[in-house]
Image (tube, rainbow, N blue to C red):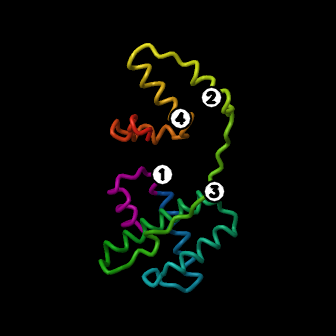
Amino acid sequence: MNTFETYLHEKGFASATIYQHWRYCGQFLEWLETQQINPSDCSYNDLLSWVDRLKQSGDNIKLVNRKLLSVRHCFSFFQLKNKEAANPAAGLYLKSSRKRLVSGTISFDRLEQLYQSYQITDARTLRNKVILSLLVYQGITTDELHRMDPGHVKLREGK
């Protein structure tokens, strides 16, 4: 696998990352060998079987995705040698359930009280109150707010 290491080095990876990819690819290739599967014959379903084995052995989804990344690099390296080789790991990513903890929520009454008490003194504070009303009454996120253009708001139509 020295040439695989060179391939990763040319990609700009640090030596520790190269070592990790090399180890994970080695684990995958060993598994292929135990299953009597040639790497060039490896299919998407074979990868899913390997992923199931990893999850059964206790690997969490983040670790499985890191190992899949290494396998993608491995197959990309194989494609350099053989242009017709497929990369069955190309679109394979595991989704994890993200758990967001909401803390410090403010009641609607308190939000409305903050909105009503906001004083308008000039054009800038008027703009800020309009933005605050979008946050309080429309429930838009700050990400959506950053993507808004002035043309998106039609004050005369209330839209």
Estimate how packed mark 1 is, as few (under 14), some (14 to 19) or many (20 or more) residues with alpha carbons within 10 Å: few
Amino acid type, callout 3: Ser
Q: SS class of the residue under badge 3?
A: loop
| Disc 2 crowd, CA 10 A, few/some/many (<14, 14-19, 20+) | some
Is 145 situated above or below 98?
Answer: above
Q: Name the residue under label 2.
A: 111
Whichever of callouts 2 and 3 sits on the residue coming sooner in the sequence is 3
Q: Which residue shows up at 42% across the image and 65% down it?
A: 73
Sequence order check: which comes first, mark 2 or mark 4?
2
Disc 1 target residue: 16
- Report how far apart the C-alphas of labels 2 and 1 lie in the structure: 50 Å
Picture coordinates of residue 139, whole percent (x, y): 55, 40
Question: Where 89 sits versus 121, above or below?
Answer: below
Which of disc 1 and disc 2 is earlier in sequence?
1
How many other residues sit within 10 Å of disc 3, few (<14), some (14-19) or many (≥20)?
A: few
Residue that badge 3 annotates: 97
Which of the two discs, 3 and 1, labels the residue nearer the N terminus? 1
Which mark is in front, 4 or 1? Answer: 4
SS at badge 4: helix
Say which residue appears at 39% left-offset and 41% top-offset: 147
- Judge whether residue 12 is colored magenta: yes
Nearer the camera: disc 4 or disc 3: 4
Q: What residue type is labelled 1?
A: Ala
The three-letter code of the residue at mark 2 reads Leu
Q: Distance between the residues labelled 4 and 1?
A: 45 Å
User: Crowdedness of circle 4 by 10 Å Cα count: few (<14), some, many (20+)?
Assistant: some
Q: Nearer the viewer, mark 3 or mark 1?
A: 3
- First in residue order: circle 4 vs circle 3: 3
Image quadrant for the C terminus?
Answer: top left
Magenta extent? 1-18
Along the polypeptide, which appears first: circle 4 or circle 1?
1
Residue picked out by circle 4: 135
